[in-house]
Amino acid sequence: MTENSNELTKRIEALLAVANQRLADQARQSTEESQQMQKRFLVFNEVAVSFLNDEIGTRVKQLTSYFPNATIEFAEVTGTHGVICRFKHTSRFPASVELRFACAHDDRVEQFICSYDLEILPVFIKFEKHDQVASPLEPLDRSTLCQWLDDKIVQFLETYLKLEFADQYQRENHVTDPVAKARLNRAIAAAETKYKGQTFYFLSDENRRMFEAAPEKYILP
């Protein structure tokens, strides 16, 4: 083998050694990153469960305590912890509503992400359907997240209460007090009575008594 051939062999083997070392370094780095990510994932699960129960759950229970038509369901899928609040259709709130809060993480499990999703059916008003806020996983900016949660719950309540006043939702609730000849929402009528199989609604109990005393007087022909 000539001197030139020996030199070429050294150059080839040197390049191969460098490449092999890079591959080994990459494999070691990938293993270390995977191990670190797994550790962060364990931290995320612990933080998410705590935040869901202590912060989100507490606030959602406080909100739904005012609405007997509301139910709460805690849900968990891979990488996400959440709670679903369902508000059933009622005469006062004639829509099916689903409010969701969830805790998730980014691809590298370095960011803690809290999301808000709202669904209202049927849709007759404008409302924010989705929002989210992020915080470093370590340390968690709990104060910012909690303030965001409070703002979202108040925002939801403002939206939900609009169902009481939007004509598209309340059309079936609009009735007329036969005594006062005034329009009212039957869901908040002060009194009601039945006459010949029909229900009549009133602005006051006094109007109901007047009607019951002489119903034909107040019924339009």
Image (spheres, rainbow, N blue to C red):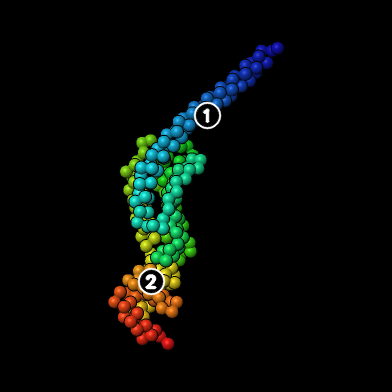
Residue occupying the point 65% across, 17% down: 9
Q: Is residue 88 left or right of residue 16?
A: left
Q: Quadrant of the C terminus?
A: bottom left
Q: Is residue 179 left or right of residue 85?
A: left
Residue occupying the point 45% across, 48% down: 73
Q: Nearer the viewer, residue 216 or 190?
A: 216
Residue 10: quarter of image: top right
Instruction: Name the residue at the right extreme.
Output: 1
Q: Of marks 2 and 1, which one's residue comes earlier in the chain?
A: 1
Residue 179: quarter of image: bottom left
169 versus 99 height, above or below: below
Q: Nearer the viewer, residue 212 or 83?
A: 212
Residue 52: quarter of image: top left
Residue 184 visible at all: no
Q: Where does label 2 land, which residue? A: 186
Residue occupying the point 46% across, 57% down: 119
Three-letter residue code for mark 2: Arg
Residue occupying the point 48% across, 61% down: 121
Numbered tag placed on residue 43 in the rendering: none
Three-letter residue code for mark 1: Ser
126 versus 24 height, above or below: below
- Image spot of residue 17 (x, y percent): 59, 20
- Image spot of residue 137 (x, y percent): 40, 37
What is the secondary structure assignment of the residue under circle 2? helix
133 versus 24 height, above or below: below
Asked if labels 1 and 2 touch by Cβ distance under 8 angstroms, the answer is no
Q: Where does label 1 land, which residue? A: 30
In whole angstroms, how far apart are the C-alphas of marks 2 and 1? Answer: 66 Å
